[in-house]
Amino acid sequence: MSGLASDIQTLDERFRFKTKMYELNENRKMKPTTFANVVASTLYEKRFGPYFVEPVVVGLQDGKVYLCSTDLIGAKDEPDDFIVTGTCYESLLGMAESLWRPNLGPDELFEVISQTLLSAVDRDCLSGWGAVVHVVTKDQIVTKTVKGRMD
C-alpha cells in the first residue's frame, strides 16, 4: 500500500483480521482475486470519508500471476502487464512502459523494477531513498533492497 501511514496501519490490521476470519470460516487460504474483492469492498465502505491509500494486490492463482490495484474508493484495475502507484505515479508509469516487455526472467524483471524505481525516486523528493523489491516466481519470492541517492 502507498499512502498515509496511519491509514496503511489501520487497513493492514483490518485485512489481517478479515483474512484470518475467512480462513477460519472456509478452512482454506484466500485466493488473490478474493482478497482483491475484500480490499475493494473495504475501501468502498468508507467512500465518503476514504482511507488515503492505494493498495496493490499481487499473487499466484492457478499458476498465473494476478495483479490488481485500487484507488481510494475501491475501484479495481486488473492489468495484464504491470501496476504502479505512489506519489511519483507518472514517472513510474513512463519508465515501466519503456523498460517492461513480456516474458522477462526473474533477474531481468528485478533490473527493470530497480531502474524504474530509481529513475522515479530521482525525480520526486517525496518518494524516498530506495526501495524493497519482491520478485515472485512459481518457486520462490526473492526480496532485495535497492539503495538510491541520499542527497
Image (cartoon, rainbow, N blue to C red):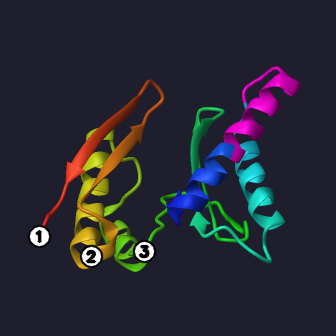
Q: Residues under labels 2 and 1: Cα distance?
A: 10 Å
Q: Quadrant of residue 24?
A: top right
On the image, numbered disc 3 is attached to which residue? 87
Q: Residues under labels 1 and 3: Cα distance?
A: 19 Å
Indicate the secondary structure of the residue bearing disc 1: loop
Regarding residue 150, the answer to whether it shows in the image is yes
Regarding residue 65, the answer to whether it shows in the image is no
Vertical order, 30 against 48 (above or below): above
Please indicate whether residue 68 sits to the left or right of residue 145 in the image. right
User: Is the Cβ of the residue at disc 1 closer than 8 Å to that at disc 3?
Assistant: no
On the image, numbered disc 1 is attached to which residue? 151
Q: Which stretch appears magenta? A: 14-29
Q: Position of residue 43 (x, y in %)?
A: 74, 63
Residue at 67% x, 38% y: name it: 16
Residue closer to the observer: 78 or 105: 78
Q: Please name which of the two marks, 1 or 3, marks the residue nearer to the observer.
A: 1
On the image, numbered disc 2 is attached to which residue? 125
